[in-house]
Amino acid sequence: MKSNAVVFKDRNQMVFESVDCPDPGPNQVVVNVTHSWISNGTEGSYLRGERIEGDTPWRPGDPHPFPVIAGYQKVGIVDWVGSEVTGLSKGDSVFVSVSAVTGMFEPRGGHISPSVSGAGAVIKLPPGLDPVAYSGLVLTQVGFNCGDRPRLEPGDLAVVVGDGLVGQWAAQMLASRGANTLLIGRHADRLAKFKNGETLLEDSGAWVDAVRERFPEGAQVGVDTVGSLQVMGQLESLMKRFGHLVSAGFYGAEDRLPLQPPRYKELSIDLVSGATRERLEKTMDLVAQEKLDTLSLITHRFPVDQAAQAWDLIESKRETVLGVVLEWA
């Protein structure tokens, strides 16, 4: 069958065009997409040719990783349900992660409609909120995972580095668990969106000393959402004994983390990645209860046929960008 998709044709080249999808089978669902949420970091690294699949960085000698349909999150309306699928009906409002495609470097993609997906990739939305609130659910779930994993007691200090989407949701989640949460970033307007804790505007490299002076007792939780080995080392230096480090960044080919320094403090380290159905459903419940806020983090919306303009804005960094949603209908 034919669909329309945002296709990365080569490094820093994209088009919105017709593509081929496999005909749906008995265990699949066809969805007419209404909104898809760009993952600025992950998709940007695909667009620049920096990764070839999931968290696997591209290295010289690897296959040329194009064309590819990037992305992994969207919402829409069910148009067709396979004979072996239960719990879903035509007309349901749903979240969808990846969908099947043919003729691409990877046999799956996100920004595509109509989408053909396995039933396990489709979750019915609860009533209430605007469905677009769930269109970034995979990415929201990464932030949930960052904030849900660490051991902490109410009042413990949690330091989150990075004021992008994952950092925002990680900070929201930690604060909801009772942590004294400090979000550190380089953008005052992004930091202003975090309402449930403290923030630190930092663009000089002196944030470690500022945190140490402000919180001499040290942190129980440290979360790196920017993908920096330097930041991981800086966070380690701030941790209390038996604290908990979380890494949610993409480190590319330079991904060697020294283990002896955190061993001295007997720190735990979580390396969060990807999504599970269970975490997606937990995250969806928290969004529905408005314990995780997504809508206020959408800063830009573009018609899907203007995806190139959306990416020009994201990559140029000429203005503050957080959530960027493509509108299909």
Image (tube, rainbow, N blue to C red):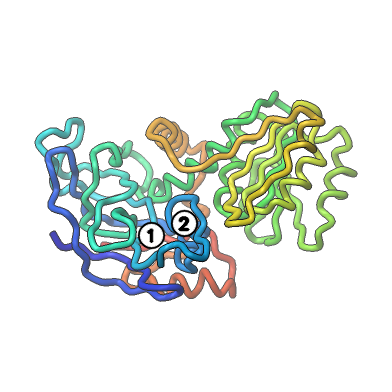
Q: Find the residue positioned furthest to the left.
A: 83
The image's mark for residue 50 is: none
How far across and how far down the image is residue 97, in percent? 34, 47
Q: Is residue 164 above or below residue 265?
A: below
In the picture, measured across the screen, residue 216 lies left or right of residue 292, that is right
Contact, mark 1 vs mark 2 (Cβ under 8 Å): yes
Quarter of the image containing the C terminus? bottom left
Vertical relation: 5 (above or below) 260: below
- Label whose residue precedes the other's in the sequence (1 or 2): 2
As drawn, is 154 to the left or to the right of 277? right
Residue displayed at 45% across by 39% down = 287
- On residue 70, which mark appears? 1
**Relative horizontal placement of residue 85, taking residue 178 as reference (left or right):** left
* x, y percent for residue 57: 52, 56
Front of the two marks 1 and 2: 1
Graded by Cα atoms within 10 Å as few (under 14), some (14 to 19) or many (20 or more), the crowding at tag 2 reads many
What amino acid is at disc 2?
Ser
Give the amino acid at mark 1. Ala
Describe the element under mark 1 as helix, strand or loop.
loop
